[in-house]
Amino acid sequence: MALSVMVHIQGEDAFLGEIDDLPDPNHQYILLRNIRKRDGKPLAYVTDGATAYLYPWNRITFIETMGEIPGLAAPASNGAQGTTIIGFFREDGRS
């Protein structure tokens, strides 16, 4: 099951994409599919026909997930739906 995410890149506008699983913080990159602008339009710098994209962790500020993540805590009992943020710390000391 693909998980919809909003990826925030340093110095660029955030974009939408899909991931197959939660990213492994030990990897050097994250695998994204079906990336697009927030309004659903294609990104100008993506080649037509490309199906998967590898983004290096050092370019990503943070990632927001849309909806519930399987295996994590259930949403609030009041029916409110939130966003889960996946974050990480850089080893080079930058924030």
Image (spheres, rainbow, N blue to C red):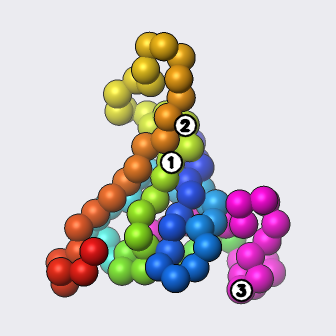
Secondary structure beneath disc 2? loop
Dominant secondary structure (helix, strand or loop) of the stretch shown in magenta: loop
- Would residue 18 appear left or right of 92 to someone viewing this image? right
**Range shown magenta:** 29-50
Q: Tag 3: residue type? A: Tyr
The residue beneath circle 2 is: 67
Asked if the residue at tag 2 contacts the one at tag 3, i.e. Cβ–Cβ closer than 8 Å, the answer is no
Residue at image position (44%, 13%) is 77
Residue at image position (56%, 58%) is 6
Q: Give the CA distance from mark 3 to mark 2.
A: 27 Å
Residue at image position (47%, 79%) is 10
Q: How crowded is mark 1: few (under 14 residues within 10 Å), some or many (20 or more)?
A: many
Q: Is residue 27 above or below residue 5?
A: below
Q: In the figure, residue 94 lies in which quadrant?
A: bottom left
- Would residue 77 appear left or right of 24 to someone viewing this image? right
Secondary structure beneath disc 3? loop
The residue beneath circle 3 is: 45
Q: Tag 2: residue type? A: Gly
Q: Give the CA distance from mark 3 to mark 1.
A: 23 Å
Q: Is residue 19 above or below residue 76?
A: below
Q: Which sits in the foreground, 69 or 52?
A: 69
The residue beneath circle 1 is: 65
Quarter that holds the C terminus: bottom left
Residue 53 is marked as none
Q: Give the CA distance from mark 1 to mark 2.
A: 6 Å
Q: Residue 92 in the image: state x and y as whole percent.
A: 19, 84
Q: Residues within 10 Å of mark 2 (few under 14, many from 20)?
A: some
Secondary structure beneath disc 1? strand
